[in-house]
């Protein structure tokens, strides 16, 4: 390959690597945001489980109070049986006693169900708190790793910027202008020809163009407009003749 083609190939490789590093650096905040969101979600789950436990505790406190009230009422009313004078009064008192005792039993059942829910919520809270601890550590590691990677990206970018400037000084202004224009509009300004095709747009090149490329010329792809070159070092080996 001609020296100016070699320099353009190197320049494009440098530009592509710079673009890759820039994209990787821009993705770092998203990685941190994702880790932070996962931690926040676990913290919400832990808070919800803790609130549910508090609710069940308050519920059982109320149920205990109401059970005691019904038991005490049943005891007070039962004492009145000794003073009744008619069957109707006795029946009314017994009905009130049965109602109070039934309510006490119902509330005790609710209290037992609350205890079962509490047991499950305690497990959920323990799991959520463990997740919070693990995700907090993960977030710190993600931030630390992102900072290290950002420094490495910056170091690599500085090396590439120096290499890029050196290469650009070696390329004729005319080729450099065309390369910059194509890179800005198409992402890449250079394309390698192989098997009589442009490897960027996969369109075939004319036989005359193919012959000129193989002679070392830098031409324009009729389809995509990129600067087209041929690299003899990457040409497929000729088939071995059969004996």
Image (cartoon, rainbow, N blue to C red):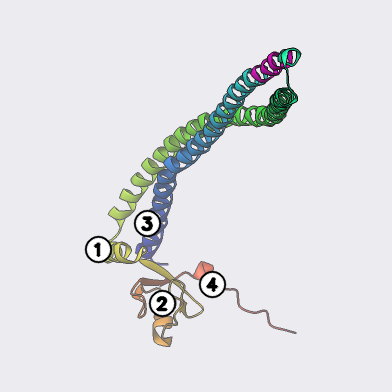
* Label 1 residue SS: helix
Query: Which comes sooner in the sequence, label 3 or label 4?
Result: 3
Distance of mark 4 from mark 1, alpha carbons?
28 Å
Query: Which comes sooner in the sequence, label 3 or label 2?
Result: 3
Magenta span main SS = helix
The front one of 131 and 184 is 131
Task: Say whether marks 3 and 4 touch (CB < 8 Å).
Answer: no
Query: Which comes sooner in the sequence, label 2 or label 4?
Result: 2
Instruction: From the top left corner, tell me how far across and down residue 61 is, in percent.
Output: 61, 19
Instruction: Look at the image and give the residue range highlighted in magenta.
Output: 68-79
Distance of mark 1 from mark 2, alpha carbons?
21 Å
Task: Say whether marks 3 and 1 touch (CB < 8 Å).
Answer: no
Question: Residue under circle 2?
Answer: 213
Distance of mark 3 from mark 1, alpha carbons?
13 Å
Question: Residue under circle 4?
Answer: 235
* Label 2 residue SS: helix
Residue found 51% across the figure and 29% down from its top = 140
Residue found 75% across the figure and 25% down from its top = 87
User: Which quadrant, please, contains the C terminus?
Assistant: bottom right
Q: Is residue 40 above or below residue 74?
A: below
The front one of 230 and 35 is 35
Question: Residue under circle 3?
Answer: 11
Instruction: From the top left corner, tell me how far across and down residue 149 is, in percent.
Output: 47, 37
Instruction: From the top left corner, tell me how far across and down residue 5 is, in percent.
Output: 37, 65
């Amino acid at each position: 390959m001609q020296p100016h083609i070699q320099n353009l190939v190197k320049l494009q490789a440098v530009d592509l690597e710079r673009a890759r590093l820039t994209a990787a650096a821009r993705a770092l905040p998203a990685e941190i945001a994702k880790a932070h969101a996962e931690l926040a979600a676990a913290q919400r789950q832990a808070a919800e489980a803790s609130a549910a436990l508090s609710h069940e505790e308050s519920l059982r406190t109320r149920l205990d109070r109401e059970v005691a009230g019904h038991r005490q009422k049943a005891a007070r009313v039962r004492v009145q049986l000794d003073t009744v004078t008619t069957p109707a009064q006795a029946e009314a008192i017994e009905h009130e006693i049965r109602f109070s005792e039934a309510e006490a039993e119902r509330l005790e059942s609710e209290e037992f169900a609350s205890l079962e829910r509490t047991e499950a919520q305690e497990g959920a809270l323990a799991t959520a708190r463990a997740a919070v601890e693990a995700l907090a550590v993960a977030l710190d590691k993600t931030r630390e790793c992102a900072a290290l990677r950002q420094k490495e990206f910056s170091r690599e970018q500085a090396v590439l910027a120096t290499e890029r400037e050196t290469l650009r000084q070696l390329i004729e202004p005319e080729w450099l202008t065309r390369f910059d224009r194509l890179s800005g509009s198409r992402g890449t300004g250079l394309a390698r020809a192989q098997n009589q095709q442009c490897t960027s747009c996969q369109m075939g090149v004319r036989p005359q163009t193919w012959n000129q490329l193989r002679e070392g010329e830098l031409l324009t792809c009729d389809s995509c407009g990129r600067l087209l070159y041929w690299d003899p070092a990457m040409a497929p080996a000729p088939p071995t003749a059969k004996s």
